Image: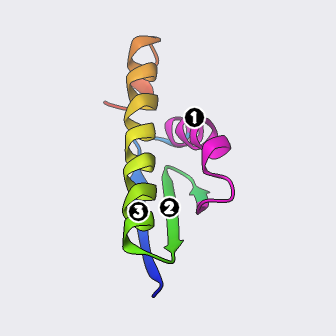
């Protein structure tokens, strides 16, 4: 059985999206397809089992949260929020 899904992350501007995209891309290669367009990142996930799919989604979301925390703690918070 194939499990497919998409996660779309929208940021305040393209600089924030670019920073997050580049931070996560190294870890995501070969596991999911990612696309950056302006201030939006789209991740397409295709797995053979529900367990693997959910693990991939969990890893992606956890990693994105870590990137946001790093951005906040390095005085780049204005990139994420108004």
Give the Cα distance between marks 1 and 3.
17 Å
Horizontal placement of 6 versus 35: left or right?
left
Residues marked 1 and 2 touching at CB (< 8 Å): no
Tag 3 residue: 7
Q: Which colour scheme is used?
A: rainbow
Which residue is painted at 50% across and 36% down in the image? 16
Residues marked 3 and 2 touching at CB (< 8 Å): yes
How many neighbours does mark 1 have within 10 angstroms: few (below 14), some (14-19), or many (20 or more)?
some
Residues marked 1 and 3 touching at CB (< 8 Å): no
Which residue is painted at 64% across and 39% down in the image? 22
Tag 1 residue: 19
How many neighbours does mark 3 have within 10 angstroms: few (below 14), some (14-19), or many (20 or more)?
few
Which residue is painted at 43% across and 47% down in the image? 59
Of residues 82 and 22, the one nearer the viewer is 22
Rendering coords of residue 75 (x, y %): 44, 11
Figure disc tally: 3
Which residues fall within the magenta stretch? Answer: 15-34
Q: Please identify the quarter of the rendering in which residue 7 is found.
A: bottom left
How many neighbours does mark 2 have within 10 angstroms: few (below 14), some (14-19), or many (20 or more)?
some
Mark 1 or mark 3: name the one nearer the start of the chain. 3
Rendering coords of residue 36 (x, y %): 59, 55
Tag 2 residue: 42
User: Most extreme residue toward the bottom, as rendered?
Assistant: 1
Horizontal placement of 50 versus 17: left or right?
left
Rendering coords of residue 44 (x, y %): 52, 68
24 in magenta:
yes
User: For the residues carrying marks 1 and 3, which lies nearer the camera in this image?
Assistant: 3
Of residues 23 and 76, the one nearer the viewer is 23
Mark 3 or mark 2: name the one nearer the start of the chain. 3
Q: What element carries label 3?
A: strand
Looking at the image, residue 25 lies above or below residue 51: above
Which residue is painted at 40% across and 12% down in the image? 73
């Amino acid at each position: 059985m194939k499990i497919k899904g998409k996660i779309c992350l929208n940021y305040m501007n393209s600089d924030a999206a670019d920073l997050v995209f580049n931070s996560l891309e190294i870890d995501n290669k070969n596991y999911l397809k990612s696309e950056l367009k302006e201030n939006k990142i789209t991740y397409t996930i295709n797995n053979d089992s529900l367990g693997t799919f959910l693990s991939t989604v969990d890893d992606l979301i956890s990693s994105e949260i870590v990137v946001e925390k790093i951005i906040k703690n390095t005085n780049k918070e204005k990139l994420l929020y108004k």
